[in-house]
């Protein structure tokens, strides 16, 4: 701990004092300035640049290469103009690329991977100049919108595309170039004053050359949307923007479903509810929900799990997503002290939520707050609970922060067998340091929990430091999870260990030590963009120092200029099983003993820009006291730009000696995505999972008949894998309408 603090102080001092000993280098804020002129009349958003507003609008300089190199001007030219009036920020971008060279992966909104692998342009905004959170708005050459919030996770600026709001756009494609036009309402942004300078950047993907470029220069080791390297958006004239104080989003839903397993009759259902967004100030928002319905949310992509721990699935429900980083950005990749999926879900099944409220945003330029209160409904099997979470984030220095979280789950209505006094509370504080250049970051974390049992050894502590120069990266994390760190809000998979003989779960407090190192080689004049050699380990020990587990990976990734990629990994495990465990379903669990085994993986992904692309992978090695072979493949056919059709296949063959059993887990997933237009999408997929013993069919139709107003029709069907007997099926519809007042 003392060494980590000393290292952080040393780098803070060196980072702060660097200009005293070297020639002064102007920052992006000084080098890249976009003066924003007041438009004399509104722009018509149609992809046509003949409007008067664009004749006097400010224009960017040439874009700079971001990846695979971060110097020199981009070969593909980009021109961007910006203006504003009391209602909108206007943006138009002209990207020079021949029509036949455009790569458009999808016409569907907010498809993050497909967006960044399509020809696109994106605007990054930091209205409060915090360098810790902001917004992104983007368009691909097919007109598909992409928007989200941006927040810091360690040194990385990460976008959350699940945030949605109403803005306007158009795209027009010409033979030699294409034009994107955006109008972003001030009502969707959180800001203090438009007369203050804002942070801004523009990011372009050139898929023909597999090159990313930015207007304001961003170092190669950071994301193109990095909030620490933004230019300046400078308002040249004063105006008071229009601000919507209230947004109402009512919904109606209904459907028919039948549980065939319990031989129930078909039953119909209908519901109505309301979401509301209230702007208390220009930078502080109150979200309210009454009887929220999540029937339109995408289902989780099923995975094969051959570990002893639960898998992590991301939050997808809209109510939990705006300013979600205020609540979720705590802990490490091994331990997450707050995970919103623990609210309103039980064993993967939804629990009715009566109402909820969330207050989030900036109190000052440096202080962000988040408060969330949710009340669930009692059912025949479950008691009702109230969930309250509060979070405070104070920015210090340039990009560093102090963060505090408090969470409470309290039973409010008792179902037979539960205790009225049941509660669970979590308190925690964290310090996160990020250098102004983004190369160094470190964290100190401390959390504790409370239950009616008033256990000791109920805390979690963690220290972490990372460094990334662009040529290499390294870091280390040490954390301790107490035996009684009982956190109903968290995701702590290594704490709970299942004893298959006694059919019980035992908590084991433990230390985890996680070092890593990576080397980055960028060959010049080669068909290879990047060679990355990486190694990492996680060592786990009990509180008394007894060994529990070690996992070590040594891997090599070769990324080619044509977007194809080759990956090799050697993975070694040594584990002391504390209890007999059922790794696969068998009559006899594996005994509590020491196991040492290694596995080797190779994977190849072809050129993603082609109409037909795919991935193949193969893993072979020992597995506990037996062997494991895994092989998989995926194929995707793109009918640009309206359709993508693909199938994924993964099979695990596990053979353990004698009575410990064998298993063959098959995961098969055909999928079709059809975009009839930029506002009509139909997605259908099948998931055949022999480990979960389920065959699922899901088909979702979405019509966005007005901006942010939708009609959903969703069909689901589940069967057994052995005899294809129907488990349950149903169809639901949901109608939402977005109304600004």
Image (cartoon, rainbow, N blue to C red):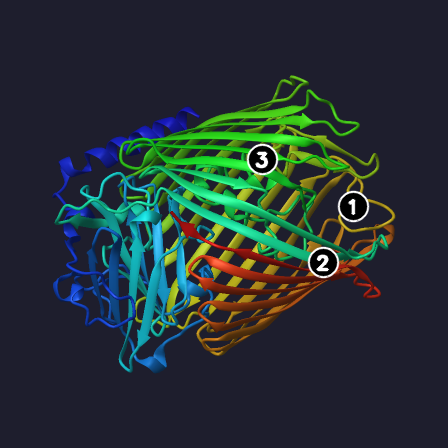
Q: Is 214 situated above or below 310?
A: below
Q: Of tags 3 and 1, which is closer to the observer?
A: 3
The residue where tag 1 is placed is: 582
The percent coordinates of residue 458 (x first, y second) are: 60, 23
Please tell me which residue is depicted at 46% across the width and 70% down the height of the picture: 106
- Disc 3 versus disc 1: distance between alpha carbons? 25 Å
The percent coordinates of residue 287 (x first, y second) are: 46, 40
Q: Who comes first in sequence, dot 3 or dot 2?
A: 2
- Disc 3 versus disc 2: distance between alpha carbons? 34 Å
The residue where tag 3 is placed is: 490
Q: Nearer the viewer, residue 552 or 64?
A: 64
The percent coordinates of residue 141 (x first, y second) are: 36, 71
- Disc 2 versus disc 1: distance between alpha carbons? 38 Å
- Does the rendering let one see residue 562? yes
Q: Residue 79 is drawn in which quadrant? A: bottom left
Quarter of the image with the N terminus in it: top left
- Does the rendering let one see residue 650? no
Left or right of 696 in this view: 109: left
Q: State the mark number for residue 98.
A: none
- Secondary structure under badge 3? loop
Left or right of 374 in this view: 24: left
């Amino acid at each position: 701990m003392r060494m980590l603090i000393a290292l952080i102080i040393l780098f803070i001092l060196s980072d702060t004092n660097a200009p005293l000993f070297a020639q002064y280098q102007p920052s992006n804020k000084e080098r890249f300035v976009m003066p924003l002129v007041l438009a004399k009349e509104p722009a018509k958003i149609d992809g046509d640049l003949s409007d008067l507003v664009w004749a006097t609008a400010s224009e960017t300089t040439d874009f700079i290469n971001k990846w695979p190199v971060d110097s020199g001007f981009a070969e593909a030219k980009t021109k961007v103009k910006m203006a504003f009036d009391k209602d909108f920020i206007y943006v138009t971008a002209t990207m020079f690329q021949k029509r036949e060279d455009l790569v458009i992966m999808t016409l569907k909104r907010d498809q993050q991977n497909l967006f960044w692998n399509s020809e696109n342009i994106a605007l990054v905004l930091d209205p409060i100049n915090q360098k810790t959170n902001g917004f992104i708005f983007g368009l691909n050459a097919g007109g598909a919108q992409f928007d989200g919030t941006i927040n810091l996770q360690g040194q990385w600026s990460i976008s959350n595309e699940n945030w949605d709001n109403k803005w306007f756009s158009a795209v027009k494609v010409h033979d030699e170039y294409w034009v994107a036009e955006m109008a972003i309402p001030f009502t969707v942004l959180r800001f203090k004053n438009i007369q203050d300078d804002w942070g801004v950047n523009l990011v372009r993907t050139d898929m023909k050359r597999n090159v990313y470029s930015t207007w304001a220069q961003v170092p190669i080791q950071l994301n193109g949307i990095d909030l620490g390297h933004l230019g300046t958006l400078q308002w040249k004239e004063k105006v008071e923007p229009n601000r919507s104080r209230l947004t109402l989003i009512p919904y109606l839903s209904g459907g028919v479903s039948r549980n065939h397993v319990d031989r129930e009759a078909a039953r119909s259902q209908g519901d109505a509810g309301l979401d509301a967004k209230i702007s208390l100030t220009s930078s502080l928002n109150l979200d309210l929900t009454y009887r929220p319905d999540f029937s339109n949310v995408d289902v989780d992509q099923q995975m094969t799990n051959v570990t002893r721990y639960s898998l992590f699935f991301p939050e997808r429900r809209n109510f939990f997503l705006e300013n979600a980083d205020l609540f979720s950005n705590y802990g490490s990749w091994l331990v997450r002290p707050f995970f919103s999926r623990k609210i309103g879900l039980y064993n993967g099944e939804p629990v009715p939520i009566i109402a909820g409220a969330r207050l989030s945003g900036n109190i000052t330029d440096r202080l962000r707050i988040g408060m969330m209160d949710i009340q669930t409904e009692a059912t025949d099997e479950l008691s009702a609970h109230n969930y309250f979470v509060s979070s405070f984030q104070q920015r210090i220095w340039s990009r560093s922060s102090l963060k505090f979280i408090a969470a409470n789950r309290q039973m409010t209505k008792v179902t037979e067998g539960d205790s009225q006094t049941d509660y669970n509370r979590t308190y925690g504080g964290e310090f996160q340091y990020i250098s102004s250049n983004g190369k160094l970051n470190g964290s100190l974390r401390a959390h504790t929990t409370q239950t009616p049992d008033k256990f000791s050894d109920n805390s979690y502590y963690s220290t972490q430091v990372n460094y990334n120069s662009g040529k290499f990266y390294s870091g280390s994390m040490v954390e301790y999870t107490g035996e009684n760190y009982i956190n109903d809000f968290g995701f702590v998979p290594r704490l709970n260990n299942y004893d298959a003989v006694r059919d019980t779960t035992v908590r084991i407090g433990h230390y985890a030590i996680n070092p890593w190192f990576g080397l980055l080689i960028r060959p010049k004049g080669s068909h290879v963009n990047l060679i990355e050699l990486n190694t990492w380990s996680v060592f786990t020990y009990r509180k008394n120092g007894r060994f529990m587990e070690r996992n070590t990976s040594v891997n090599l990734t070769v990324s080619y200029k044509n977007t194809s990629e080759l990956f090799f990994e050697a993975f070694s495990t040594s584990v002391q099983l504390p209890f007999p465990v059922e790794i696969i379903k068998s009559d006899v669990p594996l005994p509590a003993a020491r196991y040492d085994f290694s596995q080797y993986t190779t994977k190849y992904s072809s050129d993603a820009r082609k109409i037909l692309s795919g991935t193949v992978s193969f893993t072979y090695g020992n597995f506990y006291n037996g062997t494991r072979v895994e092989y998989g493949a995926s194929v995707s056919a793109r009918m640009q730009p309206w359709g993508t059709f693909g199938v994924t296949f993964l099979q695990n063959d596990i053979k353990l000696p004698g009575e410990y059993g064998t298993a063959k887990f098959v995961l098969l997933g055909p999928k079709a995505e059809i975009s009839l237009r930029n506002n009509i999408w139909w997605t259908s997929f099948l998931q055949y999972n022999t480990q979960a013993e389920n065959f699922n069919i899901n088909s979702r139709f979405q019509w966005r008949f007005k901006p942010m107003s939708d009609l959903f029709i969703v069909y689901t069907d589940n069967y057994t894998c052995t005899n294809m007997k129907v488990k349950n099926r149903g169809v639901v519809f949901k109608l939402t309408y977005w109304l600004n007042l």
